[in-house]
Image: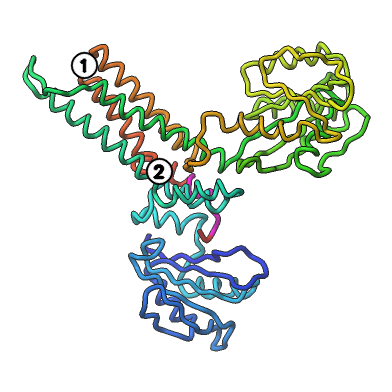
Amino acid sequence: MTDTIAAISTALGEGAISIVRISGPDAVSISRRILARKDFPEHAKMYLTSLIADGETVDRVLCVHFMKPKSYTGEDVIEIHTHGGILAAQTCLALAVSNGARVAEPGEFTRRAFVNGHIDLAQAEGVLSLISSRSNEAMKAAARTLTGELSRAVMRIHDEILSLQGRIEIELDFPEGETLTGLDVSGEIGRIISGLEELIPRCSAGMILSHGVRVVISGRPNAGKSSLLNALVSKKRAIVTEIPGTTRDIIEESIIIGGVPVRLYDTAGLRESDDVIEAEGVRLAVEAMNESDICVYVVDGSCDLSAEDSENIRGLEGRQTIIAVNKSDLENKAGDVDSLCPKIKVSAKNGEGIEALRSAIYDMAVKNCAVSSGLNVSAFQLEELRGALRDLREGEESAVIGAGDDVTAGLLGSARLRLLRVLGVGAGDELIDSMFRRFCVGK
């Protein structure tokens, strides 16, 4: 990272200010070539100056020098605050590039912060989640992660494992029959497991807060799926008619329930059809159901329960499913739907039961998750945490059955390395690349 990068760090469009960020060894010298003021002697102090192009003032700007290593990236960083709008910021960026910088890749500023040891991979995930937060709860989870709460918890567990692993390996060096006194290996591992079991639900909650849950609304034609979508989002989003098969494509809408982002998908009615377009819609509906986190299966309560409904509901057994018995404002002819899934009577027409349905979706989404104390992780990081828990449980079992200290120590070592990968240590360039590609340019 010997080159100097630059990018516009604010969203393009009209506004009060736009910020161009320059980071790298030549950041200061580039600023001297494009600004009227040549010296910025104090760290993090803002100076009023002019942006110069071809000897003429282009804009009156504010400039601040974040001196290495106390900057975000750990390098010299110059931030130039131009007036808002597209042209001023783009002109500033073009001047920086023509004077020796290159345009930054997505997430490259944060990647430099990671490489220079200012943040770890868990904190980088917190940065990304903070930018994309869609609720107060998600923002708080991101802030907890960014300030290192997850990193400290992971390192605490890592250090406990390392200490125990070291004590076990010392025993391996003892002559046969001699051991260290007072070392309860299975008990020690059990205590470490308890700490990780408390941490993982918080990380699962963070993923839900960050990425949301996919909720597919499915059912037979004319059951009221589109009406139910409209009721859940409190606006007319989907076309509603008495003609079966109106919905052909998937209609998507997002809402927030209890701080959890929920992506709702209204799908085509499930039935056999000779219509090529409707048949394709049904195929997409089935595909969406298979990829969903939660399925809300809608039954028309004003009609006898059809054999097709019964078959479809049986096919959803074992999956997170809520049965919405719609048209509760009419006489119930469907009877008690035979299913272990939660069943809620609703009326998409007059709103009866809609809040109960929202609550059921929320409860199912956050089951066994600590939403109020969530911590942001990627899917990779969460899987590494779960993998570490599996290793620890195997290590505990090996200690109980006497499989050998070398086996137990090996499993502890595997768990410890997984925890380090959560923080980016030994994660590999491919994973690091994919992580920072998710960022926007300028961050």
Q: Foreground: 332 or 270?
A: 332
At horizontal 50% and vertical 36% (from top left) the residue drawn is 370
Relative placement, left or right, of 307 versus 159 is right
Relative placement, left or right, of 35 versus 171 is right
User: Residue 53 location, x and y as percent?
Assistant: 55, 83
Which amino acid type is marked by label 1?
Gly
- The stretch in magenta equals 434-441
Which amino acid type is marked by label 2?
Leu
Q: Residue 404 got which mark?
A: 1
The number of discs equals 2
Q: Foreground: 100 or 24?
A: 24
The secondary structure making up most of the magenta span is loop
Would you place residue 309 above or below residue 352 in this image? above
Residue sitting farthest toward the bottom: 55
User: Is tag 1's residue or tag 2's residue first in the polypeptide sequence?
Assistant: 2
User: Residue 199 location, x and y as percent?
Assistant: 41, 35
Relative placement, left or right, of 202 versus 209 is left
User: Residue 145 location, x and y as percent?
Assistant: 44, 47
Q: Quadrant of the N terminus?
A: bottom left
Q: Is residue 437 magenta?
A: yes
At horizontal 47% and vertical 37% (from top left) the residue drawn is 203
Label 1 CA crowd tier, 10 Å (few <14, some 14–19, many 20+): few
